[in-house]
Amino acid sequence: MNVQPHLQMDNTTFLDWIQGREERYELAGGRVMMMTGATIRHGLIVGNLFELLRARLDRKRWLVLTDFGIDVRPARSGTPISWSISTGQRATH
């Protein structure tokens, strides 16, 4: 269940607003939505994936993260954005 603080804002305002907050939020259609915490099972899965990826990827080139935000709005063409995070390059679409 998501808690809705009844706030509406654009992406730039949201990114400024969310800085330093302990709770997790997402912006959906201009509305701020508070996200619930994950289950223990979800935490274990995330931890296992983190360990597996970190053990297999070159740490000088790749950065493995478990908790971060990402802008998944569709590109202007309507094609979803795909991300590749590398320490040597910026994320591209």
Image (cartoon, grey):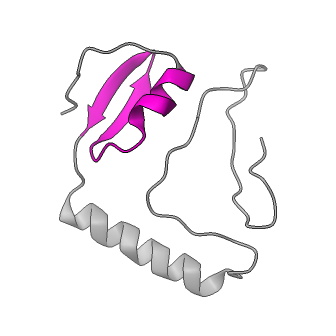
x, y percentage for residue 93? 77, 41
Q: Position of residue 82 (x, y in %)?
A: 69, 44
Q: Is residue 90 left or right of residue 27?
A: right
Taking the spot 19% from the left edge, 28% from the top edge, the residue there is 3
Identify which residue, 18 or 85, lies in the foreground: 18
Task: Identify whether 52 is placed above or below 8.
Answer: below
- The residue range painted magenta reads 11-35
Q: Residue at x 78, y 53 (%)?
A: 90
Residue, far bottom:
55
Query: In the picture, residue 19 is in which quadrant?
Result: top left
Residue 77 within the magenta-colored segment of the rendering? no
- Judging depth in this view, the residue of 59 and 20 nearest the camera is 20
Please report the residue visible at 31 percent of the width from the left and 27 percent of the height from the top: 33
User: Residue 15 or 58: which is nearer the viewer?
Assistant: 15
Task: Tell me the quadrant of the picture where the N terminus can be found.
Answer: top left
Snapshot quadrant of residue 63: bottom right
Q: Picture coordinates of residue 88 (x, y %)?
A: 81, 66
Residue 22 on the magenta segment: yes
**Is 71 located above or below residue 76 in the figure?**
below
Task: Give me the residue at 38% from left, 12% from top.
Answer: 8
